[in-house]
Image (cartoon, coloured by chain):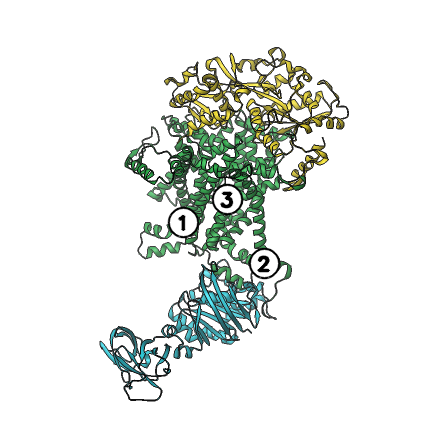
Chain colours: A yellow, B cyan, C green
Amino acid sequence: MRRRTVLGSVGGGITLGLAGCLTQDGENGETGSGSDVDDSDESPTDDSTDTDDGTETDGEDDELSGTLQVVTYESMIDGENPAGPWLKEAFEDAYPEVELEWVQLPDQGINHYVNRADEGVEIEPDVYFGLNIDDLVTVDDNLEDGGLFRDLDTDEIDRADRIRDGLDMGDPHGRVLAYDTGYISLVYDESEIDEPQTFEDLTEPAYEDALLAQNAQTSDPGQAFLLWTIDAFGEDGYLDYWADLRENGVRVLDDWTESYYGAYMEEDRPMVVSYSTDQVFAVAEGNDLTRHQVGFLNDQGYANPEGMAVFEGGDTDLAYAFFEFVLSSDAQAEIAERNVQFPAVEEEYVDLDEEFDEYAYVPPEAVTVGYEDLRGNVDEWVDDWAREFATH
Amino acid sequence: MTELRLEGVSKRYGSAEGGTSALTGIDLTVRDGEFFTLVGPSGCGKTTTLRTIAGFEVPTEGTVSFDGEPITDIPPEGRDVGVVFQSYALFPHMSVAENVGYGLQFRDPPTGTTVDERVSELLDLVDLSGMGERSPDQLSGGQRQRVALARALAPEPDLLLLDEPMSALDARLRESLRLQLKRIQSELAITTVYVTHDQEEALAISDRLAVMRDGELEQVGRPQEIYREPATRFVAEFVGDNNVLDGVVRDSEVLPSGRKRGRTRVDVGDTAFELEGVSEDARRVSFCVRPDSLSREADRNRFTVDVETTEFLGESVRAHGNWNDIPVVLRLEEVPDDTVTVGFAPDDVHVVERW
Amino acid sequence: MLFRRLEPVRGWLERRALWLTALVTTGVLAVMLYLPVGVVFVEAVLVDGTPTLDHFADVLTDPFYFGFLADVIADPLTVGTHLGALAGWLAGVSISVSLEYPVPGVGVPIPWLGLETPGVRMGLFGFTAYQAALSTVASVALGLPAAYVLANYEFRGRRTLRSLTILPFVLPGIMVAVGFYAMFGRAGTLNTIFGLAGIGPFAFVEANPLAIVILAHAFYNAPLVARITVAAWESVDRRAVETARSLGASERRAFRDVVVPQLAPAVLTGALLTFIFTFMTFPIVLALGGLQLATVEVWIYDRVQRLDYAEAATLAILETILSLGLTYAYLRYESARSGFARTSASRSVEPLFPDLRTAFTPKRLGVLAYGLVALVVFVGPVASLVVGSVTDGGGFTLRNYAFLLERQLEGATFQTRPLPAIRNSLLFGVATLLIAVPMGVTVSVLTARAGRAGTVVDALAMLPLAVSGIVFGIGLLQGLVFGIPLPGGWRFQVTGAVAIVVAHAVAAYPFVTRNVSPLLSSLDRAMVESARALGASRYRALVDVELPLIASGVVAGAAFAFAISIGEFSSTVILAGGSESYTMPVAVERYLGRRSGPALAMGTLLLVVTAASFVVVDRVGGRYEP
């Protein structure tokens, strides 16, 4: 926790509007580098001396105390009816001595922390909440293998067993636990087109100039859809498939917002790559569901599980307590409904609203390109694909 | 009041080797209370010299001093000079009075006067009483010029610098303003440096003047000296109408009028002339004859000019023509025929170059 | 007494004020611009500490980036082959003039110069330049009529309208994209209006994505062109036009001979800025046009995402070289023209619609027609955004605003609240203006008459505009937020509100300089010199004489500085970190979730607050104009 006091003074400076400052690394003997394994191994000892009664707790110990800093993406805490505030309140109710502090994920996402670790700059938060598989790949491609986050001791987290098969995210270092998942699917207007059944259908004249997708370079659903086609056609076949799609007039826009709220909702095109929870929003918005039909190609949806992990310098006791809590039935239901994603735990451990069940679709088969396949490949796949599109 | 001295002042633009030279080794003293003019064709360095005196340019070499105190490194605002520009540079967003009073916030008005009193005093001096509230836009060219003068004089500068202040005005106005300027200058006895390309103006207004060419001083002197005894061919041609002839000295030969002491025979082409003042060692000379020295009546040194154009000037006629392809300008009493034969007295010439 | 000593302290300060400002400006630029940009740029030329040009060689010879030029660069000496290829290509070019109907279903023919070329590979850079050139033409074409109307006619709300021309500048790209879809989509506002008349719907966006992208670029930049040109137009002296006409020039001829030369520098400034901005456009091209229209900046973003800083930096350096080169060329032109002195102009404005009869003259009809176009292009997308914020599937709703209100009243500390965003934006805007104006004016004063060296410095001073925004952001992060390690385990870090303001000022001051420099260099130099000979320091001469005479440029520059600060997103996000220093565009971005409503409501708030501020800025500034 000493590290935090150092940074705390910097933070104080920020609120006072301090423009420049000098800070010294390694005050109190810490080097502050998240990539320094030896150091991080010592951290729990440091922490336990600060939090007197924090020794060797299991997840249910309600005498834990201290502050847990959790970094997460905007919509978890800042959108409409987000899950974050509920999680904070409920977690703090369960552990009255613990404060959960949400930290907004910087604009560069995981790269921010990869850069920090790379530059030897301290990493303040304890937990990263909202980690994707390809984030892990980015970490391992740029830092040492298995870096940035701690290997989790799942024996310490009882509810880790509740997580559904297929959502283990495939990290060989076991650094991450899934807490929810989304499925990439098509959303289409049934008054304009029939539901496409297969990937090949999309290259048929019936779907000429019909599909809106997103740039895999800049957009998460965009990259997911690209990976889905790689899963379907293989590394050697996906570019040919995309050439056919291009021939048939697919439009690849920058990001989900403009493709959905721009081109799709303004009826420029009848079909868009989106999420299988689309109708939940459409109903909330009071929209006619004709234009919010969910289609699963090849009876599949591409799963995008979101996970949580502990930074190498993070407080494991508090983090494990938090993970345990996140995987509880109540939390799983709240996260799913507020975040409009699907729970990570098996059905028996979670009770969802009927309305959510009715409008959020789970694909018959979930596919995902795993860690091992992504590792060392994803950048090239995306680049080859993007160059095909942007060649002038 | 102030004596101004420039010593070895040079100004180069650009790098030391590759640059262009604007001024080379200017040595100049302007005496206390003197009306001194820098005259020369455009690009001769006269304006640069003025700007160096004012402090707008820093000389590459040399010093500028006021009353023996070097001021080369003092910025313009520390120099106590009044400047009037060709464009007058009146501040368009200020009234006439505000313009005139502008310098008085930095330099106190003379003891015993307030700023307002000083401003109206100056407006009186330049005959613009009561115009203080006007905007410069509402003034005529001549009035603007006088406002600029009043503005420059208001803080009682040590030195008055005028950069072609008349060039934007018509001839008649120029003449009356010139008189007024001269009157004010001698009334105030303020050391004044005046820059003009108009040699006639320079001769008329100055106590002394310097003729400049290519960044160097050609000649410094009183107007009469410059006019009568130009030191170089350039000055001879630049100042006033003049006829410059090049000839070969034939000392050993008999003069057309027989041998006389101090006279030398000089042949221009095939024509022999008889001149005074040619030094003994000269082999070739350039000499000049003013148009009013050429008369039909003169019995020496006669030659016949083909007249090309004539200008009627009222009291006299100016004729331009040529003699053996040498351009000649004459001043005659009446309009000449196609050709006119004139001559000049041997002592009515001035030798400007010899070698 | 030869020269009187000035009052000691004030005098000392005044005499050095300009140099002190210059020193501070240099310091600010060093820390907030050169350091962060340098940190990234150095990645392009250093591999493990060894200097190399390999990255440049790779990029320059990659046909994906440089098209046919890549071959020439790769093998520059085989001139014969290249000439042969060129000849073959030229032989295949054909030019045709035809009437096209660019708006689908609408019978408005437009003469179209068809250029048939046998598919030359432009490469990413070539295409980027191509779309930037088209965008520049469109922006000038849409901006000049606005400048004409605003400068030459008097009508109710003229000043307000002139103030609001800057509004598009502050809109986040994503808002503009959504606004364009909401206006031009098949279910958009325009088609709804056509639907009332029983025609349509037309697929405007689908028909020609490039055209829509260019229109969106014009949406951003035509107001910029207009704004700069209006300032110049207002200072054209009516008497000069009258003189020309009295000499027998027709109205058109007088316009061409007298007005055009005086407007040209302003128009070219606008065109230059537009070209540079649209060359580095992001993310509008992809949001409206799609990946086929990707530009260099998209690839820089991608490379940064993939942590390939070397290639990102290489691409960014090439962008910067191009932008600075163009800027330098322009500045040479500008300085070659300076000295054509501008006196205080006597303006002539006429009422736009004095009476019913004149309302139908061709000129007035032209103004009306342009007004209609402006309504569609500029007002349409903005209005559609506002409409979007108060509608949902069920029709009119205030729930998005209720969300903002609720968030303001009940939001947790880690959540983004509207009022702090508004307060921060306005505070940063004003602070930016206060820093950027002295910085910009100082650069103008020091470079305006400094000859070729001045032009070089002036061009370099435009660096903030010529550097990829993405690279600048990464540089800020790596150089300032993470900090630079110093000996002894110390780190030099710069973050927080002041850092945000200074970063905004760095981005904004070139606008002040570009607005001020042309006016400053066309002022009679003798004005300043007269003041100085009368005892004023350089600083006092600037304050007493020059600034009042170039007030219109300073005010225009100040308005731009304010706008840049309000609209700036990336460096704000980076320097604010998780702190409370978020601004309105940041709030828009943070409210953007799966539902667009809250973000649209916040965007509308941004528009209203900004519009009100600009009216105030112009009113306050207007008092200093002659």
Q: Is residue C430 visible?
A: no
Quadrant of the rendered image containing residue C60: top left
Query: How far apart are the two marked residues, 1 and 2, measured between alpha carbons?
Result: 35 Å
Instruction: Please state which of residues B98 and B253 is positioned toward the viewer in this rendering.
Output: B253
Is mark 3 in CB contact (under 8 Å) with mark 2?
A: no
Badge 1 local density, few (<14 within 10 Å), some, or many (20+)? Answer: some
Give the farthest residue toward the right: A52
Is mark 3 in CB contact (under 8 Å) with mark 1?
A: no
Label 3 or label 2, whichever comes before in sequence order:
2
The circle on residue C15 is 2
Q: Amino acid at mark 3?
A: Leu
Is mark 1 in CB contact (under 8 Å) with mark 2?
A: no
Side of A172 where C197 appears, left or right: left
Query: How far apart are the two marked residues, 3 and 2, measured between alpha carbons?
Result: 29 Å
Mark 3 — residue? Answer: C463
Mark 1 — residue? Answer: C263
Tell me what residue is drawn at x 52 percent, y 69 percent: B153
**x%, y% of residue A5?**
71, 34
Tell me, yes or no, whether dots 3 and 1 are on the same chain: yes
Quarter of the figure with the N terminus of chain A: top right
Tell me, yes or no, whether dots 3 and 2 are on the same chain: yes
